Amino acid sequence: MVMCIAWTANVHAQSRVEEDALGFLKSLPREWSGNSARDCKTYEEKNIDRLSLPFAISAATFLRAFVAMHGHVTITSAHRTVEEQRCVCEGEKGPCAGRSRVVKRKKGKRTVKIVKRSTSHHQGGFALDVRAGTGSDDEFMCMHEFARMNPSFDVIFPLGKRDRPHMEPSGTNQSRLRVASLGGGDGPVVPCTKMRTMLTYEPAD
């Protein structure tokens, strides 16, 4: 009986954490990044609802801490269906566009490599595109540094400058974060050294 009550309590606690995470992500500004030929609307509530719940918790925990310390963040893409992924890749300026790129080899030789369109982690619900502030180089560098300096949040930006908004789970602490509160990770949060506050498009009062 005691075990049953404890199990039920854990389930309810987990459900509350998941709801809080999704609610926080939906509360952030969301808009089209402008990188594709048309607005594919992959930032809507339906797209956030389809995120992997462990990743949604990690992302919400990270972004809540980042916003509290550095300011403005905008979600530009969450989960994508196959059709939405195709839409995003139409005229996209990032890795999924399928365009050729020059790869430098030894002895100064260059090879043209075609980047093939493939299944994105967005389709599995394990990726989120987020813009720091106005999307300047310094703001993105700050966000990437913040993730590196606070690994307990379990998120990384694996593509670096190739796709600066693209965030994924690092896979180090997901089991712990499934039952964590959205208050933060282990120990004190380390701010980035690049910038103090993210900028916004909105005029200050």
Image (cartoon, rainbow, N blue to C red):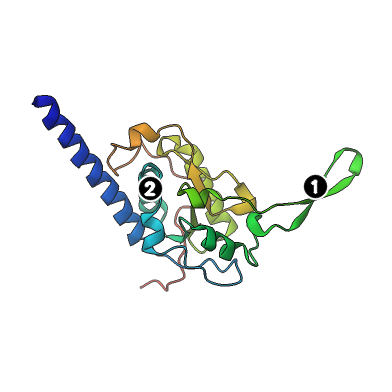
Disc 2 or 1, which lies upstream in sequence? Answer: 2
The type of residue carrying mark 1 is Val
Near mark 2 (Cα within 10 A), the count class, few <14, some 14-19 or many ≥20, is: many
Task: Please give the name of the residue rendered at 53% of the width and 62% of the height, measured from the top-left corner.
Answer: 83
- Above or below, comparing residue 144 to residue 85 in the picture: above
**Which residue, as the protein is rendered here, is positioned at the far front?**
82
x, y (%) of residue 54?
37, 41
x, y (%) of residue 199?
47, 63
Q: Can residue 139 be seen in this view?
A: yes
**CA–CA distance in space, label 2 to label 1:** 35 Å
Task: Please give the name of the residue rendered at 41% of the width and 39% of the height, measured from the top-left corner.
Answer: 153
Specify whether 8 is left or right of 94. left
Task: Please give the name of the residue rendered at 36% of the width and 49% of the height, measured from the top-left corner.
Answer: 60
Task: Please give the name of the residue rendered at 90% of the width and 43% of the height, measured from the top-left corner.
Answer: 108
Specify whether 183 is left or right of 1. right
Most foreground residue, 129 or 66: 129
Residue 103 is labelled as: 1
The type of residue carrying mark 2 is Ala
Disc 2 target residue:
56
x, y (%) of residue 138?
57, 55
Q: What element carries label 2?
A: helix
Most foreground residue, 193 or 108: 108
